[in-house]
Image (cartoon, rainbow, N blue to C red):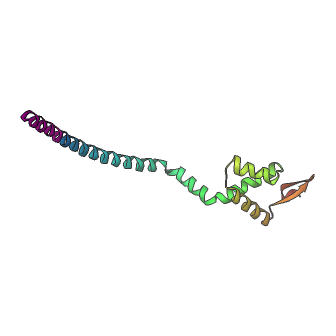
C-alpha cells in the first residue's frame, strides 16, 4: 500500500510538473503569436504603401481617374471610326476584351454619345451598325 501511495505521489508530482511546463510553453507561444501578428500588421502596411503609386505615376493615375469617362468615350469613338461595329460587337470589344468599363456604363456612354450627336446606330445591309455621324 505504501508503494502505491508513493507511486501515486510521484505520478501526481510529474503531472503537476508537466502541467506547469505546458502552461509556461503556452504563455511563450501566445507571446510569440502576438509578436508575429504585429509583424504581419507591419508588413501589410508596407505592402499597402508599396502598392500606392508615387510621383509621376501617382499623378498619371489621378489624371486618368479624373478623365476616365472622356477617355473611354474617345476610345469608343476611335473604334467606331476605324470600323463599323454592331452594338454587341462594340460592347464585346470595349467591355469584355479591353475591360474599359462595365456593360451598364458602356451603354450609358453610348447613349451620351448618341445624345451629343457624335454617333448613331444605322441600318447597313440589314444589320444595325454604330457609325460616327460625320460618315452618315
Residue at 74% from the left image edge and 60% from the top image edge: 107
Q: Nearer the viewer, residue 121 or 38?
A: 38
Q: Nearer the viewer, residue 3 or 22?
A: 3
Residue 114 higher or lower than 128, as above or below: below
Residue at far bottom of view:
115
Answer left or right for 88 relative to 40.
right
User: Does the magenta-highlighted stretch encompass residue 10?
Assistant: yes
Q: Would you identify the image quadrant in which residue 26 lies?
A: top left
Residue 97 higher or lower than 105, as above or below: above
Estimate the x, y position of residue 47 in percent, counting from the top left. Answer: 44, 47
Most prominent secondary structure in the magenta stretch?
helix
Answer left or right for 36 relative to 105.
left
Residue at far front of view:
1
In the rendered structure, which segment of residues is drawn in magenta? 1-17
Q: Quadrant of the N terminus?
A: top left
Answer left or right for 5 relative to 135.
left
Estimate the x, y position of residue 102 in percent, counting from the top left. Answer: 67, 55
Q: Nearer the viewer, residue 14 or 1?
A: 1
User: Does the magenta-highlighted stretch encompass residue 24?
Assistant: no
Q: Quadrant of the C terminus?
A: bottom right
Residue at 83% from the left image edge and 60% from the top image edge: 120
Estimate the x, y position of residue 74 in percent, counting from the top left. Answer: 72, 56
Estimate the x, y position of residue 33 in percent, counting from the top left. Answer: 31, 45
Residue at far left of view:
2
Residue at far top of view:
3
Amino acid at each position: 500500500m505504501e508503494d502505491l501511495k508513493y507511486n501515486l505521489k510521484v505520478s501526481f508530482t510529474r503531472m503537476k510538473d508537466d502541467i506547469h511546463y505546458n502552461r509556461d510553453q503556452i504563455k511563450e507561444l501566445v507571446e510569440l503569436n502576438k509578436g508575429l501578428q504585429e509583424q504581419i500588421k507591419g508588413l501589410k502596411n508596407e505592402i499597402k504603401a508599396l502598392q500606392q503609386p508615387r510621383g509621376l505615376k501617382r499623378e498619371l493615375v489621378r489624371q486618368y481617374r479624373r478623365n476616365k469617362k472622356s477617355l473611354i468615350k474617345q476610345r469608343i469613338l476611335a473604334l467606331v471610326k476605324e470600323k463599323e461595329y454592331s452594338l454587341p460587337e462594340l460592347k464585346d470589344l470595349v467591355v469584355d476584351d479591353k475591360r474599359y468599363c462595365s456593360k451598364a456604363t458602356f451603354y450609358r456612354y453610348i447613349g451620351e454619345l448618341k445624345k451629343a450627336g457624335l454617333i448613331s446606330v444605322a441600318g447597313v445591309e440589314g444589320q444595325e451598325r454604330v457609325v460616327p455621324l460625320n460618315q452618315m
